[in-house]
Amino acid sequence: MNERNPHAPNGDWSPDEFREAGLAAIEWVARYLERLPELPVVPPVAPGDIAAQIPASPPEDPEPFDRLLRDLDEIVVPGVTHWNHPGFLAYFGITGSGPGILGELVASAFNTNGMLWKSSPSTTEVELAMMGWLRDMLDLPSDWFGMLTDTASMSTFLALAAARESVEGMDVRREGLAAPGYPRLRVYASDQAHSSAEKACIGLGLGQVGFVKIPVDAEFRMRADVLAEQVAQDRAAGWRPLAVVATIGTTSTTSIDPVPEIADICERESLWLHVDGAYAGAAAVLPEMRDAFRGLERADSYVMNPHKWLFVPIDASAFFTRHGDVLRRAFQLVPDYLHTTDDAVNLMDYGLQLGRRFRAIKLWWVLRTFGVNGIRERIRSHCRLAQLLAGWIEEDDRFEVAAPVPFSTVCFRGRWPECDESELDRRNELLAERVTRSGIAFLAHTRLEGRITIRAAIGNLRTDTSRIESVWRALRSTHDEITRVGATSAQGESR
Amino acid sequence: MNERNPHAPNGDWSPDEFREAGLAAIEWVARYLERLPELPVVPPVAPGDIAAQIPASPPEDPEPFDRLLRDLDEIVVPGVTHWNHPGFLAYFGITGSGPGILGELVASAFNTNGMLWKSSPSTTEVELAMMGWLRDMLDLPSDWFGMLTDTASMSTFLALAAARESVEGMDVRREGLAAPGYPRLRVYASDQAHSSAEKACIGLGLGQVGFVKIPVDAEFRMRADVLAEQVAQDRAAGWRPLAVVATIGTTSTTSIDPVPEIADICERESLWLHVDGAYAGAAAVLPEMRDAFRGLERADSYVMNPHKWLFVPIDASAFFTRHGDVLRRAFQLVPDYLHTTDDAVNLMDYGLQLGRRFRAIKLWWVLRTFGVNGIRERIRSHCRLAQLLAGWIEEDDRFEVAAPVPFSTVCFRGRWPECDESELDRRNELLAERVTRSGIAFLAHTRLEGRITIRAAIGNLRTDTSRIESVWRALRSTHDEITRVGATSAQGESR
């Protein structure tokens, strides 16, 4: 059988078979990383193109490994949007760095489920140690409880679940939200907050009416005065204000909500303060950036994503709260088959999901491979590239910067003074699309004050000055092209 | 800079640096898999032992890769519970198989987020294609919508969120659960159902009062008659019965709820039927097992976990529903920066989490490497090993089988006719502990009808007849030892 004979047909690959396939896979990945800069960032495919090449049913019989690699090249890569590409400037630029990729390899080989301490002590203890490292690097209060979740969506869900659990006079865990006499709860965030905050409210049963968007100022920061008014109004109308989600680095413009003022309101009104630093959180590693994080130490919970700007492959979100006990009260549920007698931390008690991968290895490996100084240099260089691009844009009449650039993301628009707003929108959409279609960079757009705005989000370790120079060249020549033929005919052309 | 000079200090590893570290990592993993059978399954460590070896702060400067590998050996492995070990018989036996491990490697290198079709077409399309393969292999209705989530906890959460959304006369997404006049909702599952069903009810705001445990029959199957009574009573008392979670392969005993009878009740009472086949679902690949899945085609939603018994590394849970439209209605929320114009499926619309890894590659690679016939042989051989062990237990007076063995998990107890129940519990606990401490196998226990019961869950591709023989030898000799000295003195000894 397979322990005696490693080539048993009923077992896994033998170690030698693993070695052989593994070496081929590493070579494949190395070549992929090598040729990334030459691949188009966004693939020129239509919905269904990739699926059409995959058989409708699985094979009855085994296929050799080289065929799997061949299909990566022939089927998968032509349909991948390359998030690891130096020209990936959409959403937030991220990096699955080398040490992070290999950390995932090892985690998959362990294949542990760190639901309990006992179900794999190293899985829990390396994770808790890494949360300590993050607290240290990012200057977070040393007594915050921290754990890794998959995504900021989940971290924010857990934050608001803990908030829900913390309300005096309600026992939501036991009685649910619809118990007789319970008030309806409301969560507040700016209209620039990430959609995951509203989704969490839907998931938690508060509904969209339980989520209120607070308007922002001219720099896209939550208006604390409006927040205070809204909370007072809601209380008067019978709502129970529950929590505020403040953002340091909003998704569209990376604006920074006034956390100290919001914390004052939360304190006065007994509201849970959750801070979303999913993207910008990594910048706290820079002493010169600490000002952006003022007031954070007063938060009840916090999320920052190592898989965003800390070079760790997706997924890894770091969730912190000063109220680990409340979080555990919200979620601890121990069936007989998971009962243990040790007094260790069982991370399943702090969340919705029982299954927990060994995510901490990749974070450990990335932090040690680059070192904190190396992380600082990398984040600094991304901020510098953003300033460079923003500077060029500011100096060119054909373009305008659309929002302050506190981190590594630049929001801008092409200017055509002769056009009305809807034509401007069409032209800017076309501008981003054309540069993206050229393959040199993936530029996505958002809407700011109703107007289409292009974003360049720098966060990939392969993005360098020459790439940003090429993007800038492409933006200018595309602007000129659009000026020549207008948006409508240009769209026609490109079909 | 780094595109021109791959060794730029601000960039990622160069492809050659990746190659070198990658080959070392593959060799490390190959050796790990090779020596697994000799490692103790459960490490002899106490809480804090591992953490004590990790510095409190991250290093300021880079560390070389060989030091990371050295620390795997010196710090991590001694504290890992080896889920990939042939003697891992606790919880559910699982395998992170070779092709699955390499699939994760490649997915991490792509580092895509498949939130939108556009954000990586291959990520969405390979995933949807794999859901088609699973439908095909497992004989599921071809019109079910399917997607991968991280865990069965999340799949069940989504199922019950969709159920909550489907209630006529309520608009939970918009209004939440506490809108005036809304009835309180209740979900039903057997007292053997997985804790994630109750946790989902807590998360969704139904509360624990919104989750009712239905008793089971002598073979640990939900009593459909009691379910029907409870639903009628609750309706009379003003509750709105919402959904039933039926399980095919419960966690303690792998019992099979009477899905056809439960489906009748759900149909009559307009309840959402969610079926949890997280563990046993893979067995539907065997024609001779299809009977266990009778009635499944009538479910509203279904979960089975490729990361349990389908040899895919954690995490990967397959979630199916016949009501993809309802699921999307529950969760679709498109911010400006994620607005697209194509008519493709955007998987972020179907769940709580925005971030979605490229999980489908590992599933694709496992299914192709083994082929459906190979998967069948492997699952069959696990079921055969379970029957072998159950047969030995049945024939030995010192032991008893505690529940039917429909799949690959055996529940049993040591017998000591001279002992009362509490002494029996102590002795069985000690029996499992001692065999586990010997390093040969990890046996966990549960409680059945209040009594400690040992479980041997076979699902690892390295588990073979000789391993089960050794476990059986260890069980018998440990039983004899405990008989000689009794549980109390034996526990004293082992300190």
Image (cartoon, coloured by chain):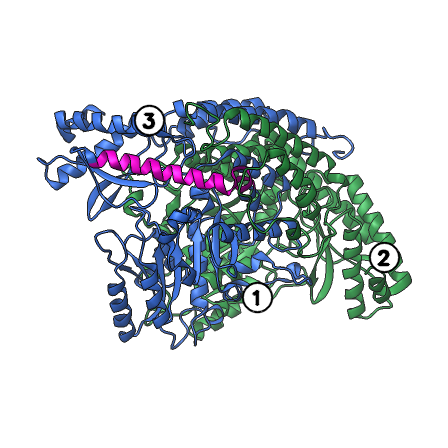
Chain colours: A green, B blue
Q: Examine the structure image and report whether residue B393 is included in the region drawn in magenta.
A: yes
Identify the residue under disc 2: A479
Q: Residues within 10 Å of mark 2 (few under 14, many from 20)?
A: many
- Indicate the amino acid at tag 2: His
- Does A316 sit left or right of A268 as displayed? right
Q: Examine the structure image and report whether residue B318 is included in the region drawn in magenta.
A: no
- Indicate the amino acid at tag 3: Ile
Q: Quadrant of residue A432?
A: bottom right
Q: Chief secondary structure of the magenta span? A: helix
Q: Tag on residue B440?
A: 3
* Front of the two marks 1 and 3: 3
Residue B231: horizontal and vertical position, in percent?
29, 69
Whether residue A466 is situated above or below residue A495 in the rendered picture: above
- Does A119 sit left or right of A133 as displayed? left
* Subunit ID for the residue under disc 3: B
Viewer-nearest residue: B31 or B259: B259
- Indicate the amino acid at tag 1: Ile
* Front of the two marks 3 and 2: 3
CA gap, disc 1 and disc 3: 59 Å
Residues behind callouts 3 and 2 on a single chain: no
Q: Which residues are magenta?
A: B365-394
